Image (cartoon, helix red, strand yellow):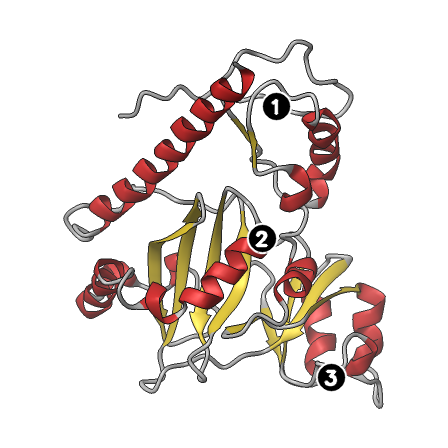
Amino acid sequence: NSGIELLTLYVVAGVELPVPLPDHDVAIVIASDSDQCREALRKIDRAASRWPRPLLNPPPLVGNLDRDKLHRLLSGIDGLDIPVTASATRAQLSELAQPNAGLANLSADFEFPIIVRPLGSHAGVGLARIDDRAAIGRYLLARPEPEFFVSRFVDYAGDDGLFRKYRIVIVDGRPYACHMAIADRWDIWYLNAGMAFSESKRLEEENFMRTFDQAFAARHQRALAAMIERIGLDYFTVDCAENRRGELLIFEADNTAVVHNMDSPELFPYKAPQMRRVFEAFAAMLYRRARDGREHAA
């Protein structure tokens, strides 16, 4: 219901960007920082200096979002906790399964338990908590992937034993609530949290959305502001929680995560108004940047 038309330009191997580019007012990079998109990002970046219109989410900044880069980018922010993350080959993980092998070979920050996931995986695919060396061997027997991310495990359960994971959307430098998942397991994503089957969980999510600016965003104002400045993207999402010290615990930042308004309005009547706020903020950003681009060209 906006006055915005979306045109998608696919950047693929073996095909150069068209000259001239299709007419547009503003462009936004939606390729991710993944192995599959690296060449596309490089191709877009080579054209960025001569791009005829404002280009949002420039490729060099998107390239900072992969898990092993993000913790280095955000390290040292007061009030923010992001676990050290290292990439490891299958051979390196196999070595760690051997007696007397040291986790410090990957990072001095590591000790059991650790979290392991395949590179490029999302929504909990291949995600596991590893409590000892024997568990590494069992994990590798079940996973075929050649490379993995390893990070320290953080127990972020609340006093009631439940885990709460938040998705925050950053639009034009401002954070917005997207969703809140509550479960009795640490490896949460929204679809396994059973939010549709619990009125009490939905009431808590509604309160999180309704009070976001005065509560969550206010508690973490400095950490959020520093994170937003360092990441520098015009638009991105953050999956996060609060650790037991009350700090903002960052799991992941992404420019491609799902942000939608498709939940049942009967079960989740509070979501549509909040998501409209997000969409309106996104549209306002595009209008502003398009206007700035026209003024600059003039």
Q: Residues within 10 Å of mark 2 (few under 14, many from 20)?
A: some
Numbered disc 3: secondary structure: helix
Of the residues tagged 2 and 1, which is closer to the observer?
2
Give the amino acid type for the residue marked by disc 2 in the picture.
Ile
Horizontally, is 121 left or right of 234 in the view?
right
Residue 10's tag is: 1
Of the residues tagged 3 and 1, which is closer to the observer?
1
Which quadrant would residue 209 be assigned to in this image?
A: bottom left
- The residue under the point 74% across, 18% down is 15
Which quadrant would residue 12 be assigned to in this image?
A: top right
Up the image or down, 290 lies above or below 19; here it is below
Horizontally, is 110 left or right of 79 in the view?
right
Residue 231's tag is: 2
Give the amino acid type for the residue marked by disc 1 in the picture.
Tyr
Query: Of callouts 2 and 1, which one flags the residue occurring earlier in the amino acid sequence?
Result: 1
Which quadrant would residue 258 be assigned to in this image?
A: top left
- The residue under the point 45% across, 48% down is 173
Q: How many marks?
A: 3
Q: From mark 2 to mark 1, how far is it between C-alphas?
A: 25 Å
